[in-house]
Image: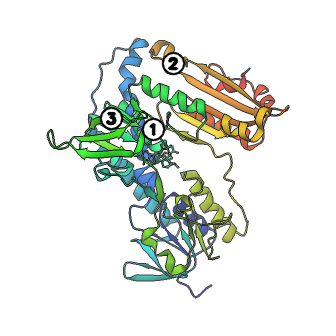
Amino acid sequence: MTNFDYDLFVIGAGSGGLAASKRAAALGAKVAIAEGDLVGGTCVIRGCVPKKLMVYASHFSHFSQEASGYGWEIPAGKLDWNKLRDAIQSEVSRLNKLHISFLEKSNVELISGFAKFVDAHTVAVGDRQFTAERILIAVGGEASKPDLAGMEHAITSKEMFLMPKFPQRFAVIGGGYIGTEFAGIMRGLGADVTQIIRDRYVLRGFDHDVRINVQESMVNHGIKFHTCINSDSLTISKNASKDESELTISFKDGDGNLQQINADTVLAATGRQPNLSPLSLDKANIEVVKGAIAVKEDSSTNQPHIYAIGDCTNRVNLTPVAIAEGRAFAETVYGHTPRFISHNNIPSAVFSQPEAATVGLSEEKARELYGDRIKVYKTKFRPMFYSLAGGDTKTMMKLIVVGEEERVLGLQMVGKDAAEIIQGMSLVVTMGGCKKDLDNTMAMHPTAAEEFMTMR
Ligand code: NDP
C-alpha cells in the first residue's frame, strides 16, 4: 500500500482510459478515472458508434430501388432527420450509462470534471486534488480546423450528430477518413454533396487502387468533387444577399481559377490533434513532441510513473489501438506480464460507400520496401447482390505478396462488407501467411470473400 490516494489515476474516460482502468482494477489496483465530458469518449459519444449508425441509416435510401429488382414494390421513403438524430443520441446515452455501470462494477471510482496536473503525482479536478502513484493520460484528440478566413462557419464531426436541421446542400473540406465517410452518409441520407480535396483522390496514404475505386464509386453515387484545390486560397463566407444561413466556399482550383460553391452546412474534416491544452502538462514536466505526448514502447512518458495511451500520443489513432495500449499498460504494470503492442499490420476500415478496408502494406509501400520482388493479385467484379438490384457498384480486391514463397504483405478491398472481410483476413498477415495458405483454404461459395482464396 502506498501513501497516495490511488495506485492509478486515469485522465479521460474514452475507449483507452476505460479499458486500462478496468483492467488495472481487476488486477488489484485502486483506481480513479476523471472525465470532463460524457463517459465513453470520442468513439462512443461522437465518433465510431454514432457514425456507424448514420452509415446504416444512409443505406436505406437505396432500399426501395434495390428491392424492386428482387420483385418487391416498396414505395421510396423519406428521411425524418430529427427522428434519426434523436434515436442515435438516445443510443449514445444508453451506452454512456452502460460504461458508467461497467466502471462501478469494476470498482473504478469515477470523478466528474476535467483533470489537470498540479505536480507529477497530483491532479486537480475542480477544487479537489488527488494524489496517485501512477497517472495514465488518455485524453484523446479533437478536430482541428485550418486557420483560414471564415472557418468558424464550418462545423466539425462532433456537431454532425447534433445538426438542428438536415442540410439539403452539404460540403465537406478534406478527403481523409471523416470527410469521405460523411460525404457518403450525407449523400445516402439525401443531401446534395460536394467534397473539396487538395489531392487528386481521397484517402491519401491508402493504396492507389483503393483511392481510385472509392472515389469512382462516390462519383457514381452522385457526390461532386473538387480536387487538387489550393487549400491556402480557401475561404468560407455567409451569403448575406440570400438566406442568411447559406454559406459560400471560395477557392482556387488546380489551374488557379476561382471556384465558388454554396452550401447550407460545411464540414471541416481536416484532421484531429491531441487534446492537451487543459492538462497543464508543464506542471509535471511531461515531454510533448509535435503536439503529442512523447511515449516509449511501453507507453511511459519521460516521467517513468506517468503513462499515455491513445490519440493523445498520436501513434495510430484508432479505438482498438487505444484499448490494446491501455490493456497492455495495465497488464505490464499491475499484472507483471510485460506486453507491448505492435503498431504494424493494424487493419483499418473507412466506412465510405462502398467500404474500404486494408491490412498490411499498400502496393506502393510494398514496392518501395521490396522493389520487383512483390507480386500483386487483383480482381474487380460486380457482387452478386447487384445482379438483380442493379447499379454499377463494383468490388475491388487486391493481394500483395513478396518473394518465392509469396508471403502476404497486404490485403486491400473496396466493396460491400469490406471491413468484415478484411477483419477476418487480417489474420493471414499477422501470422505471416503465404498465398499458398489462401490457396489451400477451401472457398465458401457464393461469397465475395472467396475471391481471396482463388486469386490467379
Ligand atoms: P485525416 O488526417 O484522415 O484527413 C484529413 C484530411 O484533411 C486530408 O484529406 C487532408 O488533405 C485534409 N486537409 C488537411 N488540412 C487541410 C486544409 N487546410 N485544407 C483542405 N484540406 C485539408 O483526418 P480526419 O479528420 O479525416 O480523421 C482524423 C482521424 O480520425 C483519422 O486519421 C483516423 O485516425 C480517425 N478516424 C478513423 C475512422 C475509422 O477508423 N473508420 C473514422 C474516422 C476517423 P491531404 O490528404 O492533402 O493532407
Residue 71 placement, left or right of 242: right
Spot occupied by residue 243 in the image (x, y as percentages of width and height): 15, 40
Q: Earlier in the sequence, mark 2 or mark 3?
A: 3
Q: Residue type at mark 2?
A: Phe
Residue at 57%, 32% in the rendered image: 210
Q: Mark 3 points at which residue?
A: 259
Query: Neighbour class for label 1 at 10 Å: few (<14), some, many (≥20)?
Result: many
Image: 116 above or below 345: below
Numbered circle sitting on residue 180: 1
Between label 3 and label 1, give the one nearer the viewer: 3
Q: At numbered mark 1, what does the secondary structure look like: helix, strand or loop?
A: helix
Q: Mark 2 points at which residue?
A: 385
The CA span between labels 3 and 1 is 21 Å
Q: Earlier in the sequence, mark 2 or mark 1?
A: 1
Spot occupied by residue 438 in the image (x, y as percentages of width and height): 75, 29
Q: Is residue 416 visible?
A: no
Q: Residue type at mark 1?
A: Thr
Between label 2 and label 1, give the one nearer the viewer: 1
Judging depth in this view, the residue of 130 and 26 nearest the camera is 130
